[in-house]
Amino acid sequence: MEIFRYLRKQRKLQSQIVPFEAMEGDPPKESPQLSNNLAENLDYLKQNIPNSPDLMFRTLRLGEDRQEEAVLVYNDGMVDKNSLNNNVIRPLIETGSLDILQCVSIANIKLSSSWDEIEDRLYRGFTLLIVDRSSMAYLFETQGWPQRAIEEPQSETSINGAHQGFSEIATQNIALIRRHLPNKQLQMSKVNVGIRGKTEISVLYLADVCHPSFIHEFLERIRRIEIDSIINTGELAECIEDHPYSPLPQFQLTERPDNVASHLLQGRIAAVVDCSPNVLISPMTFFSYFQTLDDYSSRWYVSSFIRLLRFIGFLISILLPALYISALSFHYELIPLEMIITIGESRYKVAFPPLLEALMMELALEMIREAGIRLPAPIGQTVGIVGGIVIGQAAVEAGIVSNIMVIVVSLTAIASFIIPSKEMGAAIRLIQFPMMLMAAMFGMIGISIGIMSLIGYMVSMKSLGTPYMTPLAPFRLWDWRDLLIRLPIWRMDFRPQSNKPMQKRRQGNIRHKEDN
Amino acid sequence: MMRAILFTILIVFCITSSGCMDQLDIEEETLTLLLAFGMNDEQKLTVLQTNPIFDKEIKSKTQALMVKSDSIRDSKIKLNTFTNGKIVGGKIQVVVMEKDVVMRQNPLPLMDVLYRDPKNSLNAAVIVLDSSIENLKDIVNRPDRPRISVYLKELVETNQETNRTVETTLRSFYYQMLEKGKTPSLTEVKIVRDDMIGIAGIALLNESGIYKTKLSENESVYLLLLQDEAMLPAPISIPIPMKLPESNAGKDKLSFDIMKIKHTIKPEYYSGRFHFTIQLDMTISLTEKMFLLNVQSQLPALEKIIAQKIKNDIERVVQKIQKHRIDPIGLGIYARAYSYPQWKEVKDNWGEELARADIEIETKVKVRSFGVIK
């Protein structure tokens, strides 16, 4: 009972904590304004932004006889030097014109007198020009920061799909998506999240397809976030998902523009987070984690077969170790006689009970996998080789595990890797462990209870208000065309019902059907 | 808060109450694969059980243990004092009983324990051994032998496929014993030259489980044809009564496969007894003939000869059955279905009644193919 008392106390304490910083600008304070004295303005800047050696000042003299003093302020490293030199500084020096809008060849020029806005823009790579005796400052869009080229995402390869992946720049990512859907219906809402980071989140949807309730709910959830900053899309997902305690992912993260476009066309929403190469897609159902874009570009027999394999892989990786444990400790009658003798022989030397044996191997495998990811590629290979020996014949000969266990573990691992979504794969590998415990304690009954609880839980789950297990529960036969198997494209005339699309039909006459 | 309490209670409950009572890892079990019993003159059972040895360092693969006891259950307790693991019966492959036992008494009460435990396998084949348990144990212990338990099970399965014997499991034996319209038929094996186990045919018991007679492995197929249980294609070899030149004396064998069979039983009751007409229409395929004969031209004659020969063989089997007052064919089931009032009166004495019955066999043979060479 001590623990409850402790918990209650903690709870009381928590309720006393002041909510997050009361959010600085809440209620919005009046933003300080620029004065029309240059020296005053510069003073203000230097006082308000101290210790910023990356803030550069460049004094210019403008006007017909170079009387007017003006100062260019920019954040070194956040601006594109070429653009700044050629399009801002050179015209200003050469013409000396005070008609800034006419002489500076920058597309986006903003005029502002609010210090708050100026500060914000400065840190976003804008160049500020303050002219003496003017209380309006110019903000030139000279953004330019370190960026990488557009490459194929390594974690999400596709054989037939495009080899372009998202990078860290939101505008570029949106452009990549728009390249697939150059349509006015592809609309966007921007929300800035985070007090410090002010991470820009662009929510994309097809206005005439996506159900407005989704868009509303999604934006509402994002607006409600009170956080320092969102670094990665994963953080955003965790802030807004329906079941934060669930091991199963409820949103998909993807690095592929074609994938996003395909989901948008099915009536889903995408959220592009600035500085993160992942785009969040919502709402997702359990079964959509078993689909990949490649499914739609290979022969439909082939992709149907592979999709079935994925479901089998799902079952194997959740159940196989548990079945092994329960069959060995409770239900030896299930195993064919010849196999019992082999298993008995191979287990005779093993000192540990099946559960411990399975746990050791599974944990070893998880460690090898994780180490392989974190290490640079050349060392990662070494880990693979060493790991192969550890969970291979050497462990068997040393009498730590049995032969069959090695097969079980490797099959389980392979089965979990066949699932295209890495979040779902990881979730499945996690669910294995409680299943194994249940099997070790209660045998087949334990496994049955485990499966029933899992199914019950999944059926009760929702993703952005959509039932997680559609089209299985609630049952929507129409969506089964793209569920266990994929029917030919010309058979899938309608968008998935589970997304409640406003425009249900997605295609008309695809193939030239015979007149009859 | 309530959830947290419930969750904690659930976890504690799971950990403390884990149903580990019946948990037993297979390498710690002693798997009985073969259970054999015989009986000495003082009505004491001799029980033999074999179990596989998992330890690879031991050369022998099988451990055979034999004890004397009052019952099979009792023997298990006694046997357990000799094994390093708990004896479990979930994988019993064969239950072997000495012929002497079934000669003297109904084996079902002895085997009662096998039907009580739901963990026991009811798929074990029931076998009658025409020898003593000691001889079987000698074979089990020979290092050059495969696992006799598995071997016996496979032997029965294979021979059942070629219609040399029946495969009666513990479950079907129970049914055959309790079904009034049928008497049990079991596999009978023999030990030849002290070290070879082979199929001897089908052992036939009467309704009270006493061994009556046996059908040789050659006769077995005819019983299976009558039961409509024969596995097709069913190979048969018969001598054909025909004149042969001196040089070919004794080479009158003809072999064929029954490819298709139509089996109809017509039961009737009149003039105070049962009449059964068993009609067998067969389509056969010739596989071997050891005499010279132009098959093509002689086909109708040959078909008739074969049909007659089969009919004679089957009639001999039927006579044997009637003589011993048993009914392994299951004609009683037909009698019950078609003339229940008459059956009801004789059901407790069906063997006697069947012996009085008139059983007529009608066979028709059609040769479908006779090979690639004329």
Image (cartoon, rainbow, N blue to C red):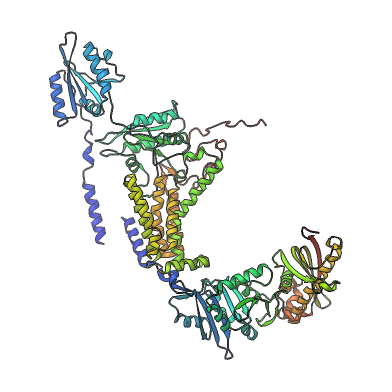
Q: Position of residue A314 (x, y in %)?
A: 46, 51
For residue A356, side relative to residue B154 (left or right)? left
Task: Farthest residue to the bottom: give it.
Answer: B42
Kindly give the residue lying farthest to the top in the view shown: A64
Is B250 drawn above or below residue A156 in the view shown? below
* Quarter location, residue B3: bottom left
Q: Is residue B31 left or right of residue A368?
A: right
Q: Could you say which is closer to the camera, residue A292 or residue B296? A: B296
Tell me the residue at 41%/43% (across/down): A463
Please report the residue visible at 39 percent of the width from the left and 40 percent of the height from the top.
A154
Query: Is residue A200 placed above or below B266 in the rendered structure?
Result: above
**Residue A342, image x, y percentages:** 48, 66
Q: Nearer the viewer, residue A366 or A23?
A: A366
Q: Is residue A143 visible?
A: yes
Nearer to the camera, B125 or B177: B125
Residue A355 in sight: no
- Quadrant of the image for the C terminus of chain B? bottom right
Q: Quadrant of residue B363?
A: bottom right
Q: Position of residue A51 (x, y in %)?
A: 15, 32
